[in-house]
Image: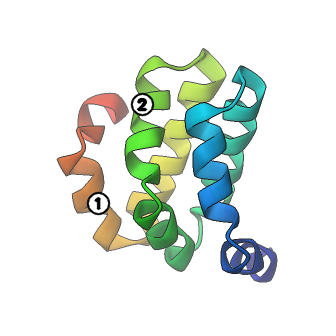
């Protein structure tokens, strides 16, 4: 629920999940991308993901990950674009349109 996701972000969870999506094992990358997709449903969380460098990490996974990682990372990026208008520009600037197309 939204309260839990805000608590995760407040506790520094976004940075952890972004790091796992970037540097983890294949399973950790998949789990982190899925968690970031769920967190990105909230606009404040989406902004936090962007601030933690998550856009670039998610674009990389959406482009180069396993099929499941690609699906989850693309979902996270789509959620970010939908709920937080400020993240749309960051996704476009980082080359996310090509990945989401």
Residue drawn at (22%, 49%) of the image: 92
Q: Which residue is mark 2?
A: 60
Q: Is residue 54 left or right of residue 86?
A: right
Q: Which is more toward the observer, 68 or 17?
A: 17
Residue drawn at (58%, 49%) of the image: 18
Where's residue 15, x and y in %?
60, 59
Where's residue 16, x and y in %?
67, 55
Q: Which residue is mark 1?
A: 88
Figure quadrant of residue 100: top left
Q: Is residue 35 left or right of residue 4?
A: left
Distance from the alpha carbon under mark 1 to that under mark 2: 16 Å
Q: Are marks 1 and 2 in contact (CB under 8 Å)?
A: no
Residue drawn at (42%, 30%) of the image: 60
Q: Which is more toward the observer, 66 or 56?
A: 56
Where's residue 98, x and y in %?
25, 30
Q: Counting other residues with Cα less than 10 Å from the Cα at mark 2, is it few (<14), some (14-19), or many (20 or more)?
A: many
Figure quadrant of residue 89: bottom left
Which of pointers 1 and 2 lies earlier in the amino acid sequence? 2
Where's residue 61, x and y in %?
50, 29
- Is the residue 22 above or below the residue 86 in the image? above
- Quick one: SS at disc 1? helix
Q: Is residue 86 left or right of residue 54?
A: left
User: Considering the image in quadrants, where does the N terminus appear?
Assistant: bottom right
């Amino acid at each position: 629920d939204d309260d839990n996701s805000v608590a995760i972000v407040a506790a520094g969870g976004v940075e952890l999940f972004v790091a796992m999506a970037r540097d983890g094992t294949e399973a950790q990358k998949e789990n982190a991308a899925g968690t970031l997709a769920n967190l990105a449903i909230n606009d404040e969380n989406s902004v936090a993901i962007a601030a933690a460098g998550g856009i670039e990490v998610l674009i990389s996974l959406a482009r180069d990950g396993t099929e499941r990682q690609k699906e989850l990372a693309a979902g996270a990026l789509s959620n970010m674009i939908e709920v937080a208008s400020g993240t749309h520009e960051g996704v476009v600037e980082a080359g996310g349109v090509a990945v989401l197309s």
